[in-house]
Amino acid sequence: MINLALMPIAPETYRKIIAAKWYMDEHFHEPIDLDRLSREACLSRYYFHRLFTRIYRRTPHQYLTQKRLRQARQWLADKEPSISDICNNVGFESIGSFSSLFKKTIGYTPQFYRNRALHQQQQARQQPRSFIPQCFANSFATPDPATPQPDPQQ
Amino acid sequence: MITRLSHVTLFVLDQQKAYDFYVTKLGFTVHTDATMENGFRWLTITAPEQPELEIALLSPHETMHPDPETRAAFKVLLEKGALGAGVLHTPDCLATYEELKAKGVVFKSAPKEQFYGIEAVVTDGVGNWFSMTQPKPVDFPVTG
């Protein structure tokens, strides 16, 4: 049996795998299965799955899930759309499975993640200094009027 | 006792173009984006699988370097590409090379076998270049 892990991959084959990855990047909101991806790559299901996993160190399914969760995090950092819309827009079929996978992977529920992100953004606007290490803030920004400055005479 | 590196500075010619390269093209994550009252923007990003190291993308402007000579010196060095910034790891150098090239990223050199792995040299378009390396031996676990 041919050992795919050791076989060199031709540039044309790389391009086919990349095309399937880009297909997932653009169509993550749709139901995508291995048949669809292998057709996109013009490779057999088996060969495509083995090559994709070898190149990206994760299965196509794992990559797609990561892509969906990454997109969900980006949308959750805004007030809109609603969490149920985000769930649908990133391709999950039920809010329950989306929420539990999100919590398992990210560590917070989608609602908690959104509240936290919005709070941090508000704080970054109102108190940007609280996000910047003091030495950087002192070197690169005008002094904070609330912070006592050293006496230049001393 | 020093235990870890939490922040590192990467000087760039233009913060917004740097954002486009690192976040949009390379898939880095924005950690903090806060602008101070004088316009100084603290923009930090993290690599996709390294959330604990913040890379501060800073462009030398008047709020950082009031001295125009210092700013000009920074600009000259960045424009010359004289500040090689570091090494980026990839699980597959050839695939990442093909993918980034198709996204319009410019490389100083194509993937080549080295004693430490397969390496290409990529430019960020805002003054820096990186070794993009697939380390040897390739022994990554499949992660979820």
Image: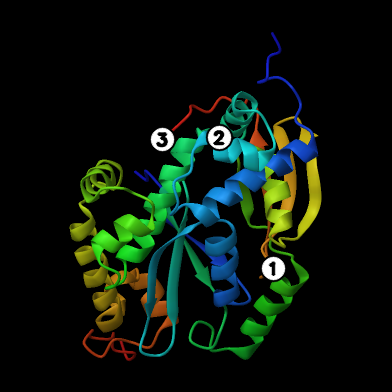
Residue that badge 1 annotates: B125
Residue that badge 2 annotates: A35
Quarter placement of the C terminus of chain B: top left
Q: Nearer the viewer, mark 3 or mark 1?
A: 3
Q: Residue visible at 66% across and 87% down? A: B69
Q: Nearer the viewer, mark 2 or mark 1?
A: 2
**Label placed on residue B31:** none
Is residue B139 placed above or below B131 in the rendered structure?
Answer: above
Dot 2, crowdedness within 10 Å: few (<14), some or many (≥20)? some
**x, y percentage for residue A16?**
70, 41
Please, which chain is the residue tagged with disc 1 on? B
Q: Residue visible at 68% across and 14% down? A: A3
Is residue B127 placed above or below B37 in the rendered structure?
Answer: above
**x, y percentage for residue A154?**
30, 86
How many numbered marks does the figure carry? 3
Q: Secondary structure at mark 1?
A: loop
Amino acid type at image mark 2: Asp
Residue that badge 3 annotates: B144
